[in-house]
Amino acid sequence: MASLFEIAILKLKELGFFNFLLPFILTAAIIYGGLRRAKIFGDPDANMAVNAIVAFVVSLFVWAAPIILGVDIEGKLASFFIQGFSVSLIVLVGLIFAGMFFKPDLAGDLSDKIKSTYFWGAILIISLMVAVVIFISSGLATVLFPKGTGFTIPPDTFITVGVLFLLAISVAVIVRSGK
């Protein structure tokens, strides 16, 4: 016999509590906090209702769009977060190994030596490229661009363009360092 708690959880799942309501509340809370911090509508204490209404409406749009478009978002979000955490874990392990094998004040030495905006621009571009690849490969891009509303790029073309872009950046860095 199922326990009372199990019956309640299954009923909440059937009503969409976990698929819509909890993500909706979390999104609204994050947007509300961002609006209060950004002070877009003036003093947060004076415009509490405006911030709450805007957060509520934006969150409703965010979570109603997949339902209206008929897109299954749960699997895509799970894949997106797993891939994102995997990339973050790889970077973290790389930093741990760098900390083990290099001298103790590596961060201070690097910040003194690398003052160029080109380096940080390259880091930003590479980070954005990784984010776009994760966004597309997880399938989350189909939430924003459902089938039939955009164009598709074959995977081999996408990889070729990415490799050519990285090659162009490498050549630019080599040519620039030679000057």
Image (tube, rainbow, N blue to C red):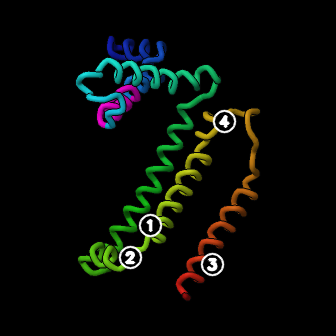
Above or below 82: residue 19: above
Dot 3 lies on which element? helix
Horizontal and vertical percent position of residue 53: 39, 18
> In the rendered image, which residue does mark 4 sit on?
145
- Identify which residue is drawn at 32% across, 17% down: 49
Residue 109: percent from left, percent from top: 29, 78
Cα–Cα gap, marks 4 and 3:
34 Å
Which of the 4 image quarters holds residue 157?
bottom right
Locate residue 134, reporting x and y percent: 56, 50
Residue at 61%, 46% (x, y): give it. 136
> From mark 3 to mark 1, how far is it between C-alphas?
17 Å
Q: Are marks 4 and 3 in contact (CB under 8 Å)?
A: no
- Label 1 crowd (10 A; few <14 / some 14-19 / many >=20): few
In space, the residues marked 4 and 2 are separated at their CA atoms by 39 Å
Does residue 65 belong to the magenta stretch?
A: no
- The residues colored magenta run 27-37
Return the residue nearer the eye: 18 or 152.
152
Residue at 54% x, 21% y: name it. 64
Asked if one can make out residue 110 in the rendered structure from this viewpoint, the answer is yes
Query: Label 2: few (<14), some or many (≥20) within 10 Å?
Result: few
On screen, residue 99 above or below 138:
below
Name the residue beneath numbered marker 3: 171
Q: According to the image, label 2 marks what residue? A: 114
Kind of residue sitting beneath label 2: Ile
* Quadrant of the rendered image containing residue 156: bottom right
- Give the numbered dot on residue 120: 1
Helix, strand or loop at mark 4 = loop
Q: Is residue 1 visible?
A: no
Distance, label 1 to label 2, CA atoms, is 9 Å
C-beta proximity under 8 Å, tags 1 and 4: no
Label 3 sits on what residue type?
Val
Of the residues shown, which amino acid type is indicated by label 1? Trp
